[in-house]
Image: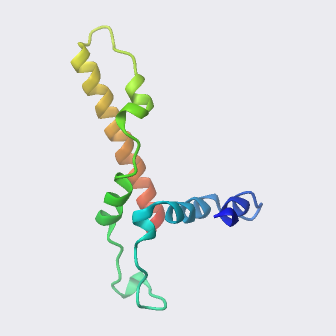
C-alpha cells in the first residue's frame, strides 16, 4: 500500500487509477472479489461488469447521513423540522447516488 502512496505523488501518476487501486486494496469486499480464470478479456466479447453488484458493494461504504455536510444544513424559515430533515436526507441520498454513479463508471469504463 505504501507503493500507492508514493505513486500518488509521482508526476506521471494518474490520480484516478491510484485511488481506484487504493480502494481495491482497502475495502474488504472489493479485495475479496476473485479474478477471472481468463488471462485477459475484452468487453467486446460479451464480457460485462456486474454494475449493480459493484454499486451495492460501494454503497455499503458510503458515509452515513449523520456524518455528511447535508446533516448540518440549516432549517429554512418556512420549513417545519420534519420538512427540513426530509430535505437534508433527500440531498444526502442524491449526493450518494451521484458519487456511486461516477465511481462505478470510473471503474467500469
Task: Using the image as rendered, state which of residue 40 and residue 57 is in the foreground.
Answer: 57
The quarter in which the N terminus is drawn is bottom right
Position of residue 99 relative to residue 75, above or below, is below
Q: Which residue is farthest top?
A: 77
Quarter assignment of residue 79: top left
Task: Provide residue 65's location: percent of width, then percent of height.
Answer: 35, 35
For residue 74, side relative to residue 13 (left or right): left
Task: Provide residue 18's location: percent of width, then percent of height.
Answer: 61, 62
Task: Provide residue 12's location: percent of width, then percent of height.
Answer: 74, 65
Kindly identify the residue that appears in the image at 43 percent across and 81 percent down.
Answer: 35
For residue 37, side relative to residue 86 (left or right): right
Number of numbered discs: 0
Quarter assignment of residue 50: bottom left
Kindly identify the residue that appears in the image at 34 percent across and 47 percent down.
Answer: 97
Kindly identify the residue that appears in the image at 74 percent across and 57 percent down.
Answer: 9
Q: Which residue is farthest right?
A: 11
Position of residue 92 relative to residue 56, above or below, is above
Position of residue 67 relative to residue 60, above or below, is above
Position of residue 81 relative to residue 48, above or below, is above
Task: Provide residue 17's location: percent of width, then percent of height.
Answer: 59, 64
Q: How has the structure been colored for display? A: rainbow
Task: Using the image as rendered, state which of residue 107 and residue 34 is in the foreground.
Answer: 34
For residue 34, side relative to residue 14 (left or right): left
For residue 7, side relative to residue 105 (left or right): right
Kindly identify the residue that appears in the image at 40 percent across and 51 percent down.
Answer: 61
Amino acid at each position: 500500500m505504501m507503493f500507492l502512496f508514493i505513486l500518488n505523488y509521482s508526476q506521471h501518476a494518474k490520480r484516478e487509477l491510484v485511488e481506484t487501486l487504493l480502494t481495491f486494496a482497502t475495502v474488504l469486499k472489493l479485495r475479496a472479489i476473485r479474478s477471472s480464470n481468463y488471462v485477459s478479456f475484452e468487453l467486446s466479447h460479451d464480457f460485462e461488469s456486474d454494475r449493480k453488484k459493484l454499486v451495492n458493494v460501494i454503497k455499503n461504504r458510503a458515509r452515513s447521513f449523520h456524518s455528511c455536510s447535508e446533516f448540518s444544513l440549516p432549517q429554512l424559515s418556512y420549513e417545519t423540522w420534519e420538512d427540513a430533515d426530509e430535505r437534508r436526507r433527500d440531498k444526502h441520498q442524491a449526493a450518494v447516488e451521484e458519487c456511486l454513479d461516477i465511481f462505478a463508471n470510473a471503474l467500469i469504463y
